[in-house]
Image (spheres, rainbow, N blue to C red):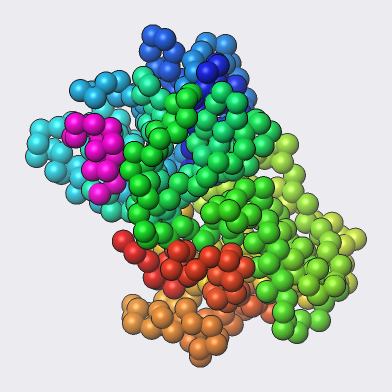
C-alpha cells in the first residue's frame, strides 16, 4: 500500500520527519525515502528496505539533512521521493495509490514528445507520471486537480515546495491523510499513530479530493473536499496499525468489534481462542471476550532476524518468511481444540502450512474465523496483491475450480448464506484441512467500522465501488 508523512515547522524538522516516516514502515515493502527543503535546495535520500528497517537505513542521512520542511514515504512499489525541476519551480513529490491507466497516459505523453527518466522493469515510475501531469498546468493546485482527474485508480500525495507542503487526498478518499499540529509545526500523515510520540495532536482528516497547503504558520484549504468517499475498509481489517484511526475510528477498536461479531451465534466447541500474529490478535481478543473463553498464544512471532514479511515480491520468500517467523508452543497446542481469528485469507498457502504445523503438534481441532468476507475481486485501487493474478485469490481460485471460465455467478458466491457461497467455503475449508471455517459477514464488518456502507470501499469482497 504505502504511507506518507510530511512536516513543516519553524524549527529544523528532520528528526520529526525521520521518526514520523518510520511510523509508516508497516505499510510498505520495497523503498523508503525522504526529501528536505533547506535554504539552498531540496536534499533527497532513497533506500531499499526489503531486508532491513527504515531507521537503520536512514540514520546516517540525518547528519547531512537540515531544513524546516520535508516529506517522507514508505513505498511498496516505486522509488520515491522524486525531485522535479519545472516551470512551477523545483518541487519534491511522494505518492500512494495505483494508476490503472498508466500505459494510456504514457502513450499520450509520447505522442506529445515527452519523455520519462525514472523506469523500473520497463515501466514508467508512477510518481514521475503524476509529476508530469501536475506540470501540465499553471499552478500546483490546478496541476494536482488535473492529475487526479486523469488517473484511473487512486492517488494521494505530498508535494514539497519552497514555501511549504501540499497535501492532497485521492478523489474518493480510498487512502487516508490526517493533519496534525503542535507548537510551531504542522504535519500530514497516512497514519495517526505517527503523531503522539512526536507531540502532535490530530487536527482533522482530509476529505476525499481535498487539497491543503501546510506552512509553519498554519494550514490553508486550496481545494475543498468532494461529497463522495470510499475509504478502503481493509485498512481496519489488516493494513492499519492498531494505534491508528481513520475517519476518527480506531483500528484496534474495530478489530475487537469484528471478533465479537464473529463470536455471536458461533457454535464451535473450543478450549481457547488465538490470533494469527499480528493483525489477527485484535480480532481474537474481541472473540474471546465476547465468548468468555481463554485467549492464548500457541504461535509467537520471532522478529529480530526476520523483519520483513509483509509482501515480498517473490512468493517462495513470502512463504519462507511466514513459516520461519511463527514459532509453535506445543504445551498450548497438544490435545486442544483451538479457534483462530485471522484478518483474511488471501491465497491460503501460508495458512495451510501453519494449520498443518498445529496438527503436527497435537491439536485436536482447528477452527478458523477470518475477520472479513471471502476475497473474490482483486483490488483496483491500491497496490494490494498486484503481484498476484485473480486466480491466486483463494476464493476466486475455488470459484474457477467449480465454474471454469464462467464468472456470471460471482455475486452469488459473494452472498453469505447462498448455496454457491456455502459450497465455496466448504471447498476452502477442506483444502486448508480445517475443522470448520466461517467468514465474517460484510454487514457485520461494516457495522464494526461504524461508517455508512456507501462511505467504504468494499470492492474486494462484493465488487462494488465508484471509479
The range drawn in magenta is 134-149
Q: What type of secondary structure mainly makes up the magenta span?
A: helix
Q: Is 434 a magenta residue?
A: no
Residue 78's quadrant in the figure?
A: top left
Residue 35's quadrant in the figure?
A: top left
Q: Residue furthest top?
A: 40
Q: For this rendering, which residue is in front, 259 or 409? A: 259
How many labels were placed on the picture?
0
Residue 76 visible in the current orientation: yes
- Identified at 63% across, 55% down, the residue is 251
Residue 280's quadrant in the figure?
A: bottom right
Residue 460 visible in the current orientation: no
Q: Is residue 296 left or right of residue 353?
A: right
Q: Is residue 397 left or right of residue 184?
A: left
Residue 275 image point, x, y percent: 73, 61
- Identified at 43% across, 68% down, the residue is 454
Q: Is 143 a magenta residue?
A: yes
Give above or below for 263 relative to 355: below
- Identified at 53% across, 65% down, the residue is 451
- Identified at 68% across, 67% down, the residue is 257
Quarter of the image that includes the C terminus: bottom left
Residue 340 image point, x, y percent: 73, 67
Give above or below for 435 relative to 232: below
Give above or below for 13 relative to 320: above
Residue 410 image point, x, y percent: 40, 79
Residue 464 image point, x, y percent: 39, 70
Q: Is residue 275 left or right of residue 430?
A: right
Give above or below for 419 relative to 144: below
Q: Residue furthest bottom?
A: 419
Amino acid at each position: 500500500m504505502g504511507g506518507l508523512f510530511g512536516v513543516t515547522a519553524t524549527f529544523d524538522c528532520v528528526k520529526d520527519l525521520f521518526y514520523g516516516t518510520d511510523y509508516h514502515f508497516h505499510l510498505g515493502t520495497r523503498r523508503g525515502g525522504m526529501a528536505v527543503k533547506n535554504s539552498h535546495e531540496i536534499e533527497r535520500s532513497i533506500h531499499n528496505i526489503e531486508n532491513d528497517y527504515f531507521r537503520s537505513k536512514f540514520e546516517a542521512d540525518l547528519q547531512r539533512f537540515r531544513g524546516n520542511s520535508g516529506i517522507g514515504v514508505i513505498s511498496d512499489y516505486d522509488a520515491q521521493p522524486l525531485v522535479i525541476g519545472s516551470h512551477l519551480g523545483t518541487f519534491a513529490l511522494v505518492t500512494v495509490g495505483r494508476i490503472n491507466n498508466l500505459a494510456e497516459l504514457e502513450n499520450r505523453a509520447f505522442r506529445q514528445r515527452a519523455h520519462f527518466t525514472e523506469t523500473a522493469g520497463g515501466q514508467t515510475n508512477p510518481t514521475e507520471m503524476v509529476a508530469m501531469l501536475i506540470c501540465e498546468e499553471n499552478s500546483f493546485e490546478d496541476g494536482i486537480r488535473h492529475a487526479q482527474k486523469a488517473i484511473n485508480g487512486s492517488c494521494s500525495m505530498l508535494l514539497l515546495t519552497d514555501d511549504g507542503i501540499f497535501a492532497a487526498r485521492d478523489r474518493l478518499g480510498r487512502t487516508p491523510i490526517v493533519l496534525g499540529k503542535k507548537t510551531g509545526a504542522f504535519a500530514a500523515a497516512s497514519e495517526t499513530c505517527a503523531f503522539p510520540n512526536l507531540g502532535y495532536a490530530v487536527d482533522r482528516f482530509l476529505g476525499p479530493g481535498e487539497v491543503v497547503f501546510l506552512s509553519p504558520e498554519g494550514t490553508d484549504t486550496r481545494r475543498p473536499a468532494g461529497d463522495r468517499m470510499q475509504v478502503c475498509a481493509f485498512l481496519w481489517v489488516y493494513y492499519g496499525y492498531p494505534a491508528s484511526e481513520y475517519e476518527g475510528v480506531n483500528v484496534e477498536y474495530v478489530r475487537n468489534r469484528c471478533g465479537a461479531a464473529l463470536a455471536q451465534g458461533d457454535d464451535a466447541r473450543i478450549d481457547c481462542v488465538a490470533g494469527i500474529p499480528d493483525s489477527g490478535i485484535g480480532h481474537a481478543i474481541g472473540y474471546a471476550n465476547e465468548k468468555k473463553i481463554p485467549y492464548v498464544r500457541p504461535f509467537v512471532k520471532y522478529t529480530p532476524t526476520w523483519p520483513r514479511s509483509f509482501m515480498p515480491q517473490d512468493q517462495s520468500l513470502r512463504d519462507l518468511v511466514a513459516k520461519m517467523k511463527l514459532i509453535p508452543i506445543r504445551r498450548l497446542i497438544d490435545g486442544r481444540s483451538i479457534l483462530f481469528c485471522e484478518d483474511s485469507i488471501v491465497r491460503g498457502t501460508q495458512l495451510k502450512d501453519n494449520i498443518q504445523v498445529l496438527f503436527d503438534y497435537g491439536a485436536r481441532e482447528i477452527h478458523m474465523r477470518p475477520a472479513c468476507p471471502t476475497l473474490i475481486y482483486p483490488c483496483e485501487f491500491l497496490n494490494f496483491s498486484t503481484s498476484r493474478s485473480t486466480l491466486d485469490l483463494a476464493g476466486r481460485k475455488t470459484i474457477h475450480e467449480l465454474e471454469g471460465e464462467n464468472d456470471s455467478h460471482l455475486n452469488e458466491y459473494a452472498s453469505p448464506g447462498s448455496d454457491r457461497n456455502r459450497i465455496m467455503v466448504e471447498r476452502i475449508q477442506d483444502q486448508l484441512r480445517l475443522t470448520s471455517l466461517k467468514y465474517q459477514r460484510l454487514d457485520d464488518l461494516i457495522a464494526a467500522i461504524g461508517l455508512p456502507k456507501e462511505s467504504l470501499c468494499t470492492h474486494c469482497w462484493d465488487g462494488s465501488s465508484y471509479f
